[in-house]
Image: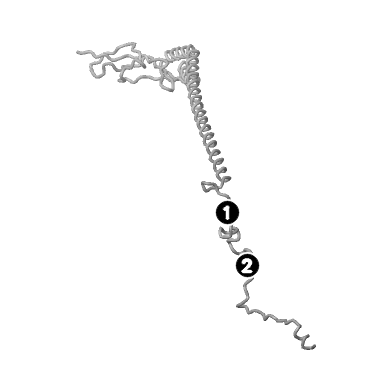
């Protein structure tokens, strides 16, 4: 009976532990997590892992990026057109401004000329009266500056110079006769042919302004050649 019991008992076997060489690497069957230090981890899985990157159009560019570029180009064109229009308007303003300045200068010059002419016409009688008084004092003084008439003549010259800007001038003997500055009131004979047509003597001085314009011509005697 004991033999039957022993023959009926099942046989148990214990498997021996496998060596490292024979044990399969179970980690190979699992996906390795991405290494944080690996630069490829920031880019995601490679095409070999089954990820082909962001969607790409047929032309090979991102639709959103293409739209942004198109908007930027349109904005640049609008800005360039606006800048060109502003430049043209500025040029027109400068041209108009230059024309205004020229017009103002011309109007000022014309106004000054007219006012100067009007002033000259208005004071002409006063000048004539003062010049006549000067001639009378010159005649009465007869070259004596210390006389009353001589002192009055000096004062009249000061008034004419200060108030009217007029000063006397006397042509020098031998100076060529100039009808714009001289008036011949007499002739003097000469045997020198070169002296003919020159001033012999001043009878009455002339008067001129500071700019050289003549108010009254000088009265002079002119040499005339006389052959023997």
**In the image, residue 153 lies at what x, y percent?**
46, 17
Q: Is residue 201 rendered to the left or right of residue 69? A: left
Q: Say which residue appears at 63% left-offset and 79% top-offset.
A: 19
- Model colouring: one colour
* Helix, strand or loop under label 2: helix
N-terminal label among 1 and 2: 2
Q: Which mark is residue 216?
A: none
x, y percentage for residue 161? 47, 21
Q: Nearer the viewer, residue 68 or 52?
A: 52
Is residue 151 visible to the viewer in this orientation of the structure?
Answer: no
Instruction: Please state which of residues 151 and 61 is positioned toward the viewer in this rendering.
Output: 61
**Can you identify the residue that label 2 sits on?**
29
Q: Position of residue 30 (x, y in %)?
A: 64, 66
**Image label count:** 2
Cα–Cα gap, marks 1 and 2:
25 Å
Classify 10 Å Cα crowding around label 2: few (below 14), some (14-19), many (20 and above).
few
Quadrant (top left, top right, bottom left, bottom right) of the C terminus: top left
Residue 225 in view (yes/no): yes
Residue 77's spot in the image, x, y percent? 52, 37
Q: Nearer the viewer, mark 1 or mark 2?
A: 2
Q: Residue at x 32, y 11 (%)?
A: 186
Give the farthest residue toward the left: 228
Toward which corner of the image does residue 41 lie, by quadrant?
Answer: bottom right
Q: Which mark is residue 53?
A: 1
């Amino acid at each position: 009976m004991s033999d039957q019991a022993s023959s009926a008992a099942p046989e148990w076997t214990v498997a021996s532990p496998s060596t490292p060489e024979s044990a399969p690497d179970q980690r190979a069957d699992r996906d390795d997590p991405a290494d944080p230090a690996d630069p490829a981890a920031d880019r995601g899985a490679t095409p070999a892992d089954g990820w082909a990157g962001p969607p790409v159009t047929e032309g090979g560019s991102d639709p959103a990026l293409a739209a942004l570029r198109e908007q930027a180009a349109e904005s640049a064109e609008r800005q360039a057109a606006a800048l060109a229009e502003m430049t043209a308007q500025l040029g027109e303003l400068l041209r108009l401004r230059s024309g205004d300045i020229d017009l103002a200068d011309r109007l000022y010059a014309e106004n000054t000329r007219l006012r100067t002419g009007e002033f000259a016409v208005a004071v002409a009688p006063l000048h004539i009266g003062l010049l006549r008084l000067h001639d009378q004092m010159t005649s009465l003084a007869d070259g004596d500056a210390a006389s009353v008439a001589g002192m009055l003549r000096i004062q009249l010259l000061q008034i004419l110079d200060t108030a009217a800007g007029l000063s006397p001038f006397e042509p020098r003997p031998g100076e060529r006769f100039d009808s714009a500055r001289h008036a011949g009131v007499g002739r003097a004979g000469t045997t020198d042919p070169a002296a003919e047509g020159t001033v012999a003597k001043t009878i009455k001085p002339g008067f001129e302004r500071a700019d050289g314009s003549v108010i009254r011509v000088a009265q002079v005697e002119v040499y005339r050649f006389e052959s023997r």
